[in-house]
């Protein structure tokens, strides 16, 4: 048995999305039940829908696009950290985990996915924690909701700090069934030429002690 666990969020019509982005729609353009020769689904959504990745280009103009992401950013060992603070990820809590250079870090929080409603209040990484991660020289981080930064307050600044330092960001993970610890990670975004981000499929496998 491979023991790989899918930590991606299924894409479906009307799923939670960032306010202002297109409402996700996965409608059949061709339907065999209606006499068409095959089934074919037409997708309408933002590149930042569901489980997806942010490229530096998302918030830093003239920087790396998603098709330039090195595969080593999201293939290899990763550490899942449980965040205890109910509102945000802060530098004081991160300091207790002794994060090392080049680590891939996944943050499990109290965040919960609703089938359709977007939650404006979710656990996020504040700007001070973003600066801590840059100082620790991590290469990749992931979080279990649609954004690493807050809906308001310092959300833009958090993105600018992380992406400006070349840290690759995975957003929209489902970590509800995963316990803290060390894992093998594979997360591959669609190779969109010049893209500021892309939907991704992410899986992990526990690394036994």
Image (cartoon, grey):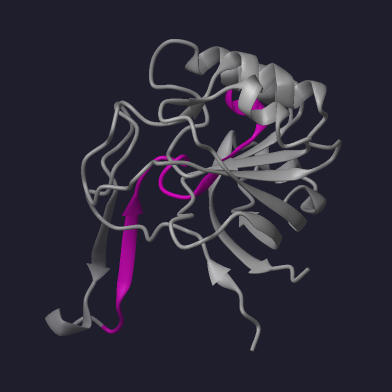
Q: Residue at x 59, y 43 (%)?
A: 142
Say which quadrant the C terminus sits in. Answer: bottom right
Q: Residue at x 21, y 76 (%)?
A: 31
Whether the magenta-drawn stretch holds residue 177 is answered as no
* Residue 121 in the image, given as x and y percentages of width and height: 32, 26
Frontmost residue, 60 versus 174: 174
- Kindly give the residue lying farthest to the right in the view shown: 101
The magenta-colored residue range is 37-61
The quadrant holding residue 68 is top right
- Kindly give the residue lying farthest to the left in the view shown: 34
The quadrant holding residue 75 is bottom right
Frontmost residue, 135 versus 146: 135
* Residue 178 in the image, given as x and y percentages of width and height: 52, 61
Q: In the rendered image, is residue 62 in sight? A: no
* Residue 65 in the image, given as x and y percentages of width and height: 68, 35
Frontmost residue, 132 versus 29: 132
Q: Is residue 205 left or right of residue 39?
A: right
* Residue 76 in the image, given as x and y percentages of width and height: 78, 58
Whether the magenta-drawn stretch holds residue 48 is answered as yes
Say which quadrant the N terminus sits in. Answer: bottom right
Q: Is residue 114 left or right of residue 170?
A: left
């Amino acid at each position: 048995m491979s023991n790989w666990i899918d930590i991606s969020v299924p894409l479906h019509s009307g799923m939670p999305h960032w306010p202002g982005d297109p409402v996700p729609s996965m409608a059949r353009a061709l339907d065999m039940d209606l006499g068409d020769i095959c089934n074919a689904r037409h997708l309408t959504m933002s590149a930042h829908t569901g489980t997806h990745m942010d490229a530096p280009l998302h918030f830093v103009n003239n920087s790396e696009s998603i098709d330039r992401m090195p595969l080593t950013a999201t293939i290899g060992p990763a550490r899942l950290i449980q965040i205890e603070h109910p509102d945000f990820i802060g530098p004081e809590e991160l300091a207790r985990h002794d994060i090392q250079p080049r680590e891939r870090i996944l943050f499990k929080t109290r965040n919960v996915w609703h089938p359709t409603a977007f939650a404006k209040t979710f656990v996020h990484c504040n700007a001070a924690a973003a600066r801590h991660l840059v100082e620790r020289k991590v290469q990749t981080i992931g979080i279990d909701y649609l954004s690493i930064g807050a809906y308001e307050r310092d959300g833009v600044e958090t993105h600018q700090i992380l992406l400006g330092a070349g840290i690759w960001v995975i957003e929209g993970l489902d970590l509800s069934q995963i316990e803290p610890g060390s894992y093998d990670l594979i997360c591959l975004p669609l190779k969109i030429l010049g893209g500021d981000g892309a939907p991704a499929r992410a899986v992990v496998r526990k690394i036994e002690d």
